[in-house]
Amino acid sequence: MRADTSIARKTRRGTRRRAVPILAAPPLPVLVGGTALVLTGALGLWQLLPDVEPTVGAGHGRGMSQVGAFDNARAGWNAEQILGHYYPGAELGQIGATTIGVRLQAQDDATLDTYAAAGAQVAGRMIGPGEAAHLTPMPDGGASVVVTAGCDGEVLWQSATDDPYVYPIGAGPGRPADEHLTLCGGTAYRGALGVALENGSYRTVNQVDIEDYLAGVLPAEMQANWADQGAFEALRAQAIAARSYALAEDRYPYAQTCDTTDCQVYPGTVKEDARTTDAVAATVGTVLLRDGLILRSEYSAAPDGGRPADIETFAVGPAPGDLVESLPIPALPELPADPGPTIEALAGESVIDTEYRRLGGPGSSIGAPIGPEMMLPQRAGTYRLYTNGVIVATKTLGAQVVDFSTLLQLVPEVGDQLPGSAGSRPKPDGAQGDPLVEGAPQLPNLADVGPAPHPNAAPDPNASPDPNAATDPGAATGPGAATGPGVSTDPNAAATPDASGTDAAPGPEMSSGVDPNFAPEQILEPDPGAVPPPLQPNAVPTE
């Protein structure tokens, strides 16, 4: 054999190192069952050995043949010799830590729904273990974000962000499995997951360190068990070719490459194998160059072993020094020591958070929180429980404090979540306890939804009395009688004589317990067909 092909090595600064001679080899003899066979034409080793077969099909036949690489590795060639044979005239270069964007084509036209067992970061906030982030791309390049308890659980909060990505809790490649972002109902991915718009269509993008990306690509493009059959060098050659191919790609404004055979097969972490990961680590940062630019080194599973390619017909990408190196995960904002009403303190807050902080936080009369924000029935707003009361928020009216009995009217099933000392639970005789928070309004019962009555309207003689209303034992009965504190009294109405014939003594204006600002039709009759406006930062999660 004669050394007629060489592959030189370049650093990122372009300094040339020693050339590595590559041996151009004739067809290789292989022993099968004690008989020496020469593999020529369309006959390849994958046809003779049961454990050797193409992973994703024969392909287009340009560049390195994966089957040929297997044959050559078994014959004793190293990765550099294999690459020198298939890409004559190419050079080796070195890159630093680099992130690549991958379009996940199976996610086209879908929102991004993802979570991580260890938690994640989105919109400048942490989300807890198992909490799911749901991102929808916006025309301005940002995204609307809804965070739920699990993939299909209650809405915990929602907002808008100009950074349309969900990040793992830890930065850098090689993160543990519990930090990988998992698609709801799908597979897991290393790195960050985000969304973009392409001509009005939704796209999902995996921004991932190039070495983490290759850990998913290699076992999908070659069989990991080739390492056990004397072909580890074929895996090394594949790692270098796949790294070069991906970094030379420039397919979309939002991602360099894709995850299917249109580009390279990349199924996330589902096929990762220690043997192929070792091959990636053994070639970390190594790429093929042509004239100092990264070569789009095509390859295939051509069963005849393939032939050397004319690398001048291959596209090239950037120079190693022009790559954008991996950036750390954005740092979460640090809250000020004094939680005053600053922009920094308000960043990422819901209106309930803001109201709670205005009241004084844990040191206020409402006490400490005892659960996350939850949705009201009919998605009319949100609420959060505290040890001494509840804060309820609606899109129209903002946040207000109510007592536990008021919440029970709207969400009866919440009773099991109330603290044992909840003094405003319904009493056996139907009377309500005093509010634990002074001035806490009450909201109407869901069954009472309807137009708000005019304050001067005459009472409806056919209306049924409120069975829960507290009555005054000494009060007169009848349509004109004064009633107890559970029924609203018109302060402009003439006084009604009592049973003795004398006028009832004027008293303080009485209230129904319903905050006049909380009109039922405003709170509990959202239009199910309405399209919500784009979310703004700190928006209340309503529909």
Image (spheres, helix red, strand yellow):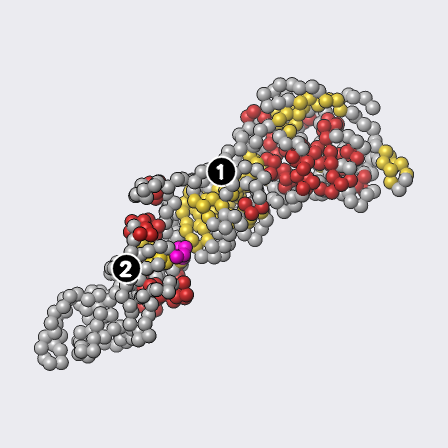
State the extent of the magenta-drawn residues as a range: 370-374
Q: Residue at x 29, y 62 (%)?
A: 436
Where residue 145 sits: x, y (%)?
44, 47
What SS does tag 2 mark?
A: loop
Residue 82 tag number: none
Viewer-closest of 496 and 167: 167
Viewer-closest of 390 and 463: 390
* Residue 188 lies in the magenta-colored region: no
* Amino acid type shown at disc 2: Val
User: Is 319 drawn above or below residue 524 in the view shown?
Assistant: above
Q: Is residue 391 visible in the rendered structure shown here?
A: no
Please give left or right for residue 314 compared with residue 373 in the image.
right
Q: How many marks?
A: 2
Which residue position holds label 2?
Answer: 437
Chief secondary structure of the magenta span?
loop
* Residue 373 lies in the magenta-colored region: yes
Q: Residue at x 37, y 51 (%)?
A: 540
First in residue order: circle 2 vs circle 1: 1
Which residue is outermost to the bottom? 500
Please give left or right for residue 445 compared with residue 211 in the image.
left
* Amino acid type shown at disc 1: Ile
Q: Residue at x 19, y 66 (%)?
A: 510
User: For the residue carrying disc 1, how many other residues have a C-alpha within 10 Å: few (<14), some (14-19), or many (20+)?
Assistant: some
- The quadrant holding residue 227 is top right
